[in-house]
Image (cartoon, rainbow, N blue to C red):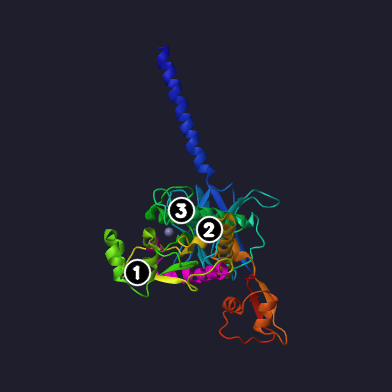
Amino acid sequence: MFFAVAVNKRQTSSFLILFFVLTFNVFAANKIEGVRIWPAPESTRVVFDLSQKPKFSHFTLKNPQRLVIDFANSKSAVSLSNVLKNDKRIKKIRLSTPKKKGSTRLVLDLASSYQLAVFPLSPAGTYGHRLVIDLYDKHGKNTVKTNNTNKTKRDIVIAIVAGHGGEDPGSIGARGTYEKKVTLNIAKKLSALIDKQPGLKAVMIRKGDYYVNHNRKTELARKSKADLLISIHADAFTSSKPSGASVLVQSTRRANSEFTRWIANRQKESELLGGAGETIKRTKDKNLAITLADMKKEYTMGSSYAFAEHVIKQMKKVTKLHKSKPEGLSLAVLKSSDIPSVLIETGFISNPREERNLNSSAHQKKLAKAIFTAVDHYFSQNSPDGTLYASLKLKRHLIRRGESLSVIAHRYNVSVSSLKKVNNLRSNVVKIGQTLKIPRAD
Ligand SMILES: [Zn+2]
């Protein structure tokens, strides 16, 4: 008896709780009460007034560009037809079918893709709860922002692959220098320099004395969203004579079936080597082919080549060059990475003088510094959208009477060719009153 009563009481209270939960939910729906649009030269702010603190999520869609905002457990009590007054970034604000029952989906039809900041604001002054959406022009200065501006400007990621490792020593010099050790030392020094620079971030694909297979290398580089992949190697040849550094990029221009066959069946490499490219003949580097196979597709080849030119320009200040131009290797048939990639042969380990150099910490530092400078210069001129590098303004120069390209180049310690490149100039002719962008010093 006593037992039965107790059960009844428990059931009653459960029903009461259920009743309150349901009732609370019905009355708790958030109400979208107003929308304000604030167009500015470099951004547009959209503010939604809400009856309660919003629970929201958002995502973007392409073709056409849209921003979708879902307000959980909410109702719209606002007319959206008249809120837009000549805003160049938002074409339309409209309601759409929400995915979850009881939520409200708003769609902003946009003119382009923008850098976004979406955040709630607590009641202040005459305002209640709000949800703010800022749309920033991608090349804008982003000077006015409630939150930390740097948060939305990402770092440029550089993946560094120290060649060989573990069971695979790479080339071995006459004095017993292991390529795998040299490449790791240079990679570590380069990584430190990159991490010190605001706006750049290094990802070491190999951190110690172990081997990373080529699929994993690409996977790691992709996972870290690398903008660039740099493989570091040291060359070797059967004779001790050749010396100097070289930079290799993938190229499809000269399809070489012998070479791809050699990759497919490396046990027979000795037979096929005679017909393969010069580089393969002299490197004796089994991984070179695989690394090159991992390099990016044709559409990123241009950027690889451009970066390689920067590397050569800097490397020749600190070491002899084996080849004065980036070397292209054809590997069109092979699966390749979509990340711009270069392979840097830092010198010949088979050359006694260079073996000594490659072992020296001071020389390794010089090589790392040269590669770092190339990275900095390249991304200063080719900074991806949304990065801190892209937001750093280039210096500008107004051309006055008597000034020529070479005079300006000399004044800012940059080359005429880089001045032309940054300003998309086809000839050396400049006009009085013209403004030129000034790249960073060479
Ligand atoms: Zn190597």
Ligand 1 falls in which quarter?
Answer: bottom left
Which residue appears farthest toward the right when viewing the image?
401
Residues in magenta, as a range: 291-316
Q: Does residue 420 lie above or below 358 as drawn? A: below
Q: Residue at x 58, y 58 (%)?
A: 365
Q: CA distance from mark 2 to mark 3?
A: 12 Å
Give the amino acid type for the residue marked by disc 3 in the picture.
Tyr
**Circle on res. 332:** 1
Label 1 Cα crowd, 10 Å radius (few <14 / some 14-19 / many 20+):
many
For the image, the number of numbered tags is: 3
Which marked residue is nearer to the observer: mark 2 or mark 3? 2
Q: Nearer the viewer, residue 306 or 266?
A: 266
Location of residue 81 in the rendering, given as x and y in whole percent from the top left corner? 54, 65
Q: Is residue 238 magenta?
A: no
Seen in the image, is 272 located left or right of residue 135? left
* Circle nearer the N terminus (3, 1): 3
**Circle on res. 356:** 2
* Residue with the mark numbered 3: 178
**Circle on res. 257:** none
